[in-house]
Amino acid sequence: MKDNVVTVEFIAIAENERFARMVAAAFVVPFDPTVEEITEIKTAVSEAVSNSVIHAYNSSGEGTIKLEMRSTEKGTITIIVEDYGIGIDDIEAARAPMFTTSALEERSGMGFTIMESFTDKLIVESEKEKGTRVTLVKMLDISCGL
Ligand SMILES: Nc1ncnc2c1ncn2[C@@H]1O[C@H](COP(=O)(O)OP(=O)(O)OP(=O)(O)O)[C@@H](O)[C@H]1O
Ligand SMILES: [Mg+2]
């Protein structure tokens, strides 16, 4: 299988969280992933996209999110979720379990922790008032399909 790259851009509304997770799942299908791997990828993408919708653009529905997916023939999947919103003050603090800047009870501050545990590598880059780029790297176990 050749290396692949797919990029989609969509407006930052909650409905597109579902779209993004479906697209990410569809992207990895050629690798014959396990149900667990698909679930982990979908969940990690959901968390990243919902953060952009809720935090980056303050749930305004304004702004866009870019989802870039890359794969290598060895089954390394790299998914980048990028927004152009408010940015993160302190990335290290934001990544800590239970850290949230939201007063809403439904926010538990576990998004980054979930992304980290469901992937092999999580990179968070951000600049105030410029935006945030979250890179999720997942090594699929393609040996079982051979
Ligand atoms: N794309 C983003 N733009 C701006 N701030 C962000 C972004 N992503 C995360 N943050 C900040 O990092 C904090 C931690 O994010 P995390 O996803 O771990 O928790 P949460 O979104 O607050 O709660 P939960 O994900 O459990 O609903 C957020 O409260 C927010 O302040
Ligand atoms: Mg979150």
Image: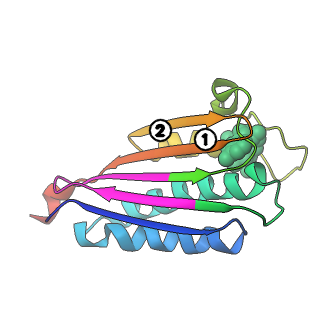
Label 1 packing within 10 angstroms: few (<14), some (14-19), many (20+): many
Q: On the rendered structure, is 90 left or right of 42?
A: right
| Residue furthest front as drawn | 130
Q: CA distance from mark 1 to mark 2?
A: 8 Å
In the image shown, does 130 or 133 lie closer to the viewer? 130
In the image shown, does 85 or 36 lie closer to the viewer? 85
Which disc is residue 112 wearing? 1
Does the stretch in magenta take in 91? no
Compared with residue 38, is residue 77 higher up or lower down, i.e. above or below? above
Mark 1 lies within 8 Å of ligand 1 (Cβ measured): yes
The residue sitting at 66% across, 62% down in the picture is 64
The residue sitting at 33% across, 57% down in the picture is 70
Q: Main secondary structure of the magenta part?
A: strand
The residue sitting at 62% across, 58% down in the picture is 49
Q: Quarter of the image for the N terminus: give it.
A: bottom left
Which disc is residue 122 wearing? 2
Compared with residue 97, is residue 77 higher up or lower down, i.e. above or below? below
Tag 1 and tag 2, C-beta contact below 8 Å: yes
State the extent of the magenta-drawn residues as a range: 66-80
Residue 142 image point, x, y percent: 19, 58
